[in-house]
Each structure stands twice: as C-alpha cells, then as structure tokens.
Amino acid sequence: MIRRMLLSLTLLTAAPAALAEPVAIYGKTVWTGTSQGTITDGVVVIDKGRIVSVGPASGAVPAGAEEVRADWVTPGLISAYSATGLSEVSGVDDTNDAGASGSHFSAALVAADGFNPDATPIAITRLEGFTRLAVAPQARATLFGGQGFLADTSGLPGSIFRDKAFAFIVLGESGASLTGGSRPAAWASLRGAFDDVRFFGARYMSHNEGNVLTRMDAQALMPAVKGDQLILFKASRTSDLNAILDFKEQNPALKVAILGADEGWRVAKRLAALDVPVIVDAFSNLPATFSQLAATAENAKRLSEAGVTVAIVHLDNDGHQARLATQVAGNAVANGMTFDDAMRALTTAPAEIFGMTGLGVLAPGARADVVAWDGDPLEVVSAPVSVFIDGEAQPMESRQTKLRDRYRTLDESQKPLAFKR
C-alpha cells in the first residue's frame, strides 16, 4: 500500500515536468544504435518522455526547444548486471541486502524488496551515463539466488519498472560449493528443482517441501521453468557452458542468458546457434580460478564476431562500481572488438537480453533515455554533461561531487582546531 502511494505521488509530482518544452540535444557525433548508424553533427529532439526525431543538426527543431550541446550523444547506458542499490557498505550487514545466507528461501527471494533508490551508488552510476540497471541478488545459501529486477537510476520512488525480470542461478565452482561440493551435486539440485516445479500439484499436495524447493520457491521458479521468464545462469568454464547449452537443447522453451562466460569464446558458435546471449567482463583476462584458465582479453571480440549477443559489465565490486563498464568496453575495443559492438554491449544488447522495449537506442518513438558527453564515451577521461531519463533532465551531482565541492572551496579559517598546527 505504501509503495503504491509513493508511486502515485511520484507520478503526480512528475506531471508538470511532462509538460515541459521539447529539448534539442546537439552532438558533434550522435551514436544511435540503429540502422541510422552514427551521425556527424546531429540532433536528438525529445518531448513528453519520448524521442521525437534523430537526424542532422540542420533538421527542423520545435520552436522554443531547450538546447543542449555536446561532443557526443548516445542512448542511456544499461548495466546488464550489478547489485547496485542493494548495498550501501558491502561489509556492513545492516546495509547489505544483496544475499541471505541464513534464509530458508531461495528462488522466492525478490531482490526488489531490498532496493534502496537513495543508495549512494545510484547517483554515482547515473553520473557516468547509466540510466537503467538489471540488478541481481547474490546466491549465498543455494544455487538459486532469487528474482532479479530492472530499475532506472533516477533515485526516485517507483524507479523499479519490472520487479521479477529474471531468475538468477549460479553454477560452476560457486554452484558446486553451495550444493555439497561438486558440479554433479549442483546439476542434481537444478534438475530436482525443475521437477519440483513441473510436478507441483502432486508434489506439494500434502506438504510444503519438494525434493529441492519449498512450495514458495517452486511457485517463484515456475515462470522460468515454463519459459515465461529469463533465467540468468552464472558460469565461466567451457564444460559448464556446454552443460548449460545441453540443458537449453533439452528444454528449448527456456529463455537463457549466461553471466561470466570467461571461456565463452571456446563455445561461441554454439552460443550463437542456440541464440544464448552472454554478459561478460571483457577485462577478465587472467585465470583467477580454475574455471578461467582459458580467459582472454579477446573474449568479447571473438564472441561478437561469432554472432553472439554480448553485453559488457564490470564484475569486480558489482554493488558499487557498475559504472566502470565503459572502461571495460574501452579495453574490449583495445583488444579487437569494434567500437560499435562495444557500444551495443552497453546499450542495445542489455535491452534485448532483458526485453527493455524502446531503450538502448536513439530512434523516433523510443523512450527518451539520452546522454550528452564531453567526449568519446569509451575514453576514461570523458564524462556526461547531461543525462535524461524518460525525457527528464537528471541532477548532475552525487554525494561524491557534493563532498568535492564542499572541501574544494572550504574557508580554511573555519577549519576545526584539530586541523590547526
């Protein structure tokens, strides 16, 4: 009830902004993410939360439109995987809702219930050009992490726009350790869980426990087993990836994507043939575990060249540093991936994987998530100068920028005595 009231209040307070004048965003380079390609000296016109037109700067612009000028203009970037908004301080349990090692539930855990739009990393992530997030819970008790969600980075109540977007399941080394110590145990748990769902009526008729799942967990996993919900598997090793692809072939109705896939290049043709997308950290190029012995900085390049849908993320400290995916994508380009493929890995690919219609592109009718940059988005020295989410100009400040500005101009005469020598 409270959540519905907050959402209604958000919509009411946003109403006047929806009546604002159109905005014309001019860019020396406009990357559209569509067949229109990259436009030199272009303009993107937005109005009432939608993109009205995309074309040359000489094109018609509504009278009275507000103007924004930048070196580059792109769609809002999409973080294809993170724990952003689930933890404020990772090492402090009171502020960390990313996982629940002591819970009796697993697949039924809804990460959206722990999302805090006021969390410090939200604004920091938005300032780096990310307007949308796919947020996943961590699997800490079983291989079933729970239900991941999709949200924008406005920091407003109601910013979650799909609360049960995908089921998150961990396999490989992590899945093995969570199910008794071996991959066979993990796969037995997965198959047993699917059987619990498929025979739900008979299995839970007289009790609350299945072979693997509680009644509540089985109900939560049901849409994924039926193929109505995306399953995001986490795995890296070639044999683990092949096992997932075998499972997909045995269950063709399943909607499957793979997170990690450090050795994905070795099964690239099969991933493409089965239309299974991957979400990779393109900077993962060293064997940190035995599941990454064939890791290479050319992984993203090779996968993309094989026709695999590739999204790029930053997996180190994914609760606070999702914004570093642009640097990871830049490194992918340095290792052979084309610039357009790297940009698609931050925009159109995540939108496709999670079914975010009208996002990740600059096209008439698309939702007006637009970012204006002072330089090439994949260059580490570049930064957004304006960010729009559904046509709304976002504040270009965070806790970090406020602290910077406060202490950069601090009157030294007002320093506490402890600072005086």
Image (spheres, rainbow, N blue to C red):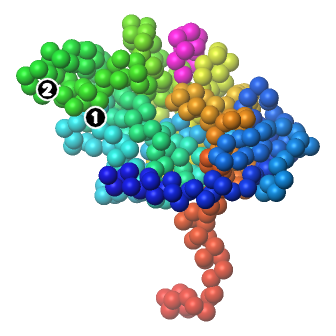
Q: Is residue 418 left or right of residue 411?
A: left
What is the three-letter code of the residue carrying label 2? Glu
Q: Position of residue 282 (x, y in %)?
A: 60, 33
Mark 2 — residue? Answer: 209
Residue 346 appears in the picture as rendered = no
In the rendered image of this protein, does residue 69 appear above or below residue 236? Answer: below
Answer whether residue 266 is magenta in the image: yes
Judging depth in this view, the residue of 122 and 417 nearest the camera is 122
Left or right: 308 in relation to 176: right
The picture quadrant where one finds residue 342 is top right
Q: Position of residue 191 (x, y in %)?
A: 28, 15
Label 2: element kind: loop
In the image, residue 125 lies at what x, y percent? 57, 51
Q: Residues within 10 Å of mark 1 (few under 14, many from 20)?
A: many
Left or right of residue 64: residue 412 = left
Magenta residue span: 265-277
Secondary structure beneath label 1: loop
Q: In this orientation, does residue 114 appear?
A: yes
- Can residue 71 be found in the magenta stretch? no
Along the line of sight, the residue nearer the viewer: 406 or 421: 406
Could you tell me which residue is drawn at 51 percent across and 57 percent down? Answer: 12
- Which residue is denoted by mark 1 in the rendering? 108
Query: Would you identify the image quadrant in which residue 104 lies?
Result: top left
Give residue 145's position: percent from left, percent from top. Answer: 33, 34
Answer with mark 2 or mark 1, whichever residue precedes in sequence.
Answer: 1
Which residue is found at the position 11% from the left and 20% from the top? Answer: 205
